Amino acid sequence: MCRWVSWTTALLLLGMVDVARPDKLVEAGEFEYPERTVTVVCPWSPGGGTDRVSRFWAGALEEKFGQPFVVVNRTGGAGAVGHFSSAYAKPDGHTIGMITFELCTMHRMRISRLTYEDYECLLQVNADPAAIIVRNDAPWQTLGELLAEIRARPGELRMSGTATGGAWDLARAGLLQAADLPINSVVWVPHPGAAPSLLELMGGHLDAVCCSVPEVASQLANQQVRVLAVMAEERIPDYPDLATAREQGTDWVAVGWRGLALPKGTPAEIIDLLASRCSEIADSDAYRDFMQKNGFGIKVRTRGEFTEFLREQDAQWKSVVEAAGYDKGLTGNNDPGPHALPWALLVGLVGIGGWELARTGGGGEATSTSARSFRRLAIVCIALVSYVVAIAWLGFAVSTYFFVSLTAWKLGGKLWSASLAAGLILGTVWLLFVFAFQIQLPKGVLGLPF
C-alpha cells in the first residue's frame, strides 16, 4: 500500500512539473519542442548591434519556451561564416539564424553561395535606412548640393561608414547610381564600422559618412553633424525633420535589416510555433522599449512578407554590386574562384606530359615507358576534370578526399596509405582555411554535411 501511494505521488509530481513547463507540448501537433538548448547564431562580433538584438531575442524566446536559448557568434568571411553555420545546421529547430542585410549581397560578390532561399524565414525584426552625414560646418545643406559638388569634382571627395562591399558602401554606391553619377566619383575609404568613420569625419579626414541615423544619434543631438538625406521610403518617425533622398529628387531606398530564420527543411509545425511566438515578442512592450533604448528601428514582417522582401532585396542589389565591380570579388576584382587551382594543375600536367612525351619519343623500351607515363598522366588529367565538376555538386571535402586518395592509388600507392594520406591532407586544409582563415570552402548544391 505504501509503495502504491509513493508511486502515485511521484506521478502526480511529474505531472505538475510538466504543467509548469511552458510550451513543452504543442496543443495541436503533440510534439515536444525544444528538446534541448537552442542556439541562436549571430554572424557578427560580440557587442555590436546584431549581437545585442540576437541576445534580446534569445532571452525572450527562453522565457517563452522554458529552455535555454544561447547566442553563439560565428564571425568571419564578411558574415558568410555565421550565415553558413545557421543555414546548414540540422533542420530540427534547435538552430536559429539571425540573418542580416549581407545575405542578399555576399553571393553577388563571390563571398558565398548562400541566398535567402537557403532559409525558412521566421520574422524580420529590424530595419534602419542608410543616411548621408556631414559635419555641421560642412558647406552642403542638402543632398542636391553634395551631389552637385561630387559631379563638379569627381574622385576628390572621400566617404566611409563600413568596409568595402558592406551595407553602407553599397547604399552609397546605389545612391550615386540613382543620381546618374559614376560610383567611383567618390573615394570610398574602408573602415570597420560607423564609429571609426565618424572619428575620421570629425577630424576632417572624410567629407561624408554613410550609415544609419541611430549610429550618429549622440553627435546629431550635440549638433556636431548634419544629416543631408535618409535613404528611406518615408521620413523616420523618431526624426521627422530629416528629409529623404526621394524628397530631394533622388529615387533611392537603402535599408539595413535583421531577421530570424531557420535552416531549409525544418518541420512545418516547428516553423509555425516559432513564428507565432516571435510575433508575440515583436508585439510586446519589452521589445519596443529595448529597440528604443538602443536606437534601433522596428520593422516587423511576418514569414511570407519577409520572404518576399528578401526576394526584392536580392534583385535590387544585383545591379548595384555589378555597377560597383564587386561581382568580380573584393580582392582587387581579380578573384579566380575555387576552381582555379584544379584547372591550373590540369593545364600544367598536360603541358609537362606533352613535353616529356615528345622528349622521350622513339622506339623500343623508351616508347613503352613513355606510353605508361602517358597513361598515368591521362588518368590524373581525367581525375582533375572530374574533381572540378564534383566540387560544384559534392562540395570541397568529399571531392578532395576521393580525388587525392584515388589518384595516389592509381599512381602506385597502396589503397590504405592513399586513403590515410587523403584524410590527413583534407584535415590540414580544412583546419587551415575554415578555422584559421575563416574562409568558407565550397559545399556543393547537394548540401552534404562535409
Image (cartoon, rainbow, N blue to C red):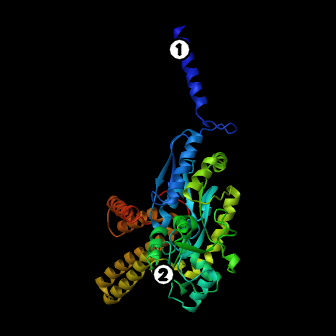
Q: Residue at x 66, y 76 (%)?
A: 245
Q: Residue at x 56, y 64 (%)?
A: 214
Q: Position of residue 229 (x, y in %)?
A: 62, 75
Q: Residues within 10 Å of mark 1 (few under 14, many from 20)?
A: few
Q: Earlier in the sequence, mark 2 or mark 1?
A: 1
The quarter of the picture where residue 87 lies is bottom right
The residue nearer to you, when weighing 403 against 313, is 313
Relative to 397, is 56 above or below?
Answer: above
Going by the image, does 28 lie left or right of 432?
Answer: right
Q: Position of residue 372 (x, y in %)?
A: 35, 77
Residue type pointed to by label 2:
Asn
The residue nearer to you, when weighing 310 against 407, is 310
Going by the image, does 272 lie left or right of 427?
Answer: right
Q: Position of residue 78 (x, y in %)?
A: 48, 67
The residue nearer to you, when weighing 89 against 414, is 89
Q: Can residue 53 be seen? A: yes
Relative to 383, is 266 above or below?
Answer: above
Could you tell me how many numbered marks the image carries?
Answer: 2
Tag 2 secondary structure: loop
**Residue placed furthest toward the bottom:** 152
**Residue placed furthest toward the left:** 365
Q: Residues within 10 Å of mark 2 (few under 14, many from 20)?
A: few
Q: Residue at x 59, y 55 (%)?
A: 292
- The N terminus: image quadrant: top right
Q: Residue at x 42, y 79 (%)?
A: 346
Query: Residue 6: which disc?
Result: 1
Residue type pointed to by label 1:
Ser
Cα distance, mark 2 to mark 1?
A: 74 Å
Q: Which residue is mark 2?
A: 333
